Amino acid sequence: MFAQRMSIQDSKTIYRVIEECLDNLHERPQVDSEISPQDDLVDILEIIGHEHRKWLIGLWNLHRVSQEPLLTKTGEVIAEPLIWFKSNGKTYACFGHESPRQRVIQKLDDFGVSVLEVGQDLGKGADS
């Protein structure tokens, strides 16, 4: 990189950004490469409330809970629930205390996904 006149503000900005980039190459911040399942559980409890700890741990222990968006086989996003999982061949999605929009509910229904309310037992109205 070369600038004709270092007194020009744009040139100073370019050099400052390049210096910061070079510093980042040599002084990378340390980031946890893995997040434990317990960290995920704690994060979800912060959102839904610690009073639902027993319910969430029960789901966590019985099912493979995911926090990723629900996708079609072609990769289209169906919805972005807080958590989702499969149980007995059926998919359940929980959006925390926020209800998904009607359009999202319809899309979930089209793909056979049931909305699960926070604290709701799978045997009590989860299929309706």
Image (cartoon, rainbow, N blue to C red):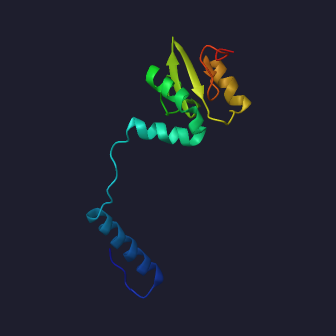
Outermost residue toward the top?
A: 88
Kindly identify the residue that appears in the image at 28 percent across and 64 percent down: 27
Which residue is more in the foreground, 55 or 3? 55
Outermost residue toward the right?
A: 102
Which residue is more in the foreground, 7 or 22? 22
- Quarter of the image for the C terminus: give it: top right
x, y percentage for residue 52?
A: 58, 32
**Apparent side of residue 32 relative to residue 91 in the rendered image (left or right):** left
Count the marks: 0
Which residue is more in the foreground, 49 or 43? 49
x, y percentage for residue 75?
A: 50, 28
Q: Is residue 56 above or below residue 29?
A: above
x, y percentage for residue 63?
A: 46, 21
Kindly identify the residue that appears in the image at 56 percent across and 38 percent down: 50
**Apparent side of residue 6 relative to residue 99 in the rendered image (left or right):** left
Q: Is residue 7 above or below residue 96?
A: below
Q: Is residue 10 visible?
A: yes
Quarter of image, res 28: bottom left
Kindly identify the residue that appears in the image at 50 percent across and 42 percent down: 43
- Quarter of the image for the N terminus: give it: bottom left
Outermost residue toward the left?
A: 26
Q: Is residue 70 visible?
A: no
x, y percentage for residue 99?
A: 69, 33
Kindly identify the residue that appears in the image at 37 percent across and 76 percent down: 15
Which residue is more in the foreground, 20 or 30? 30
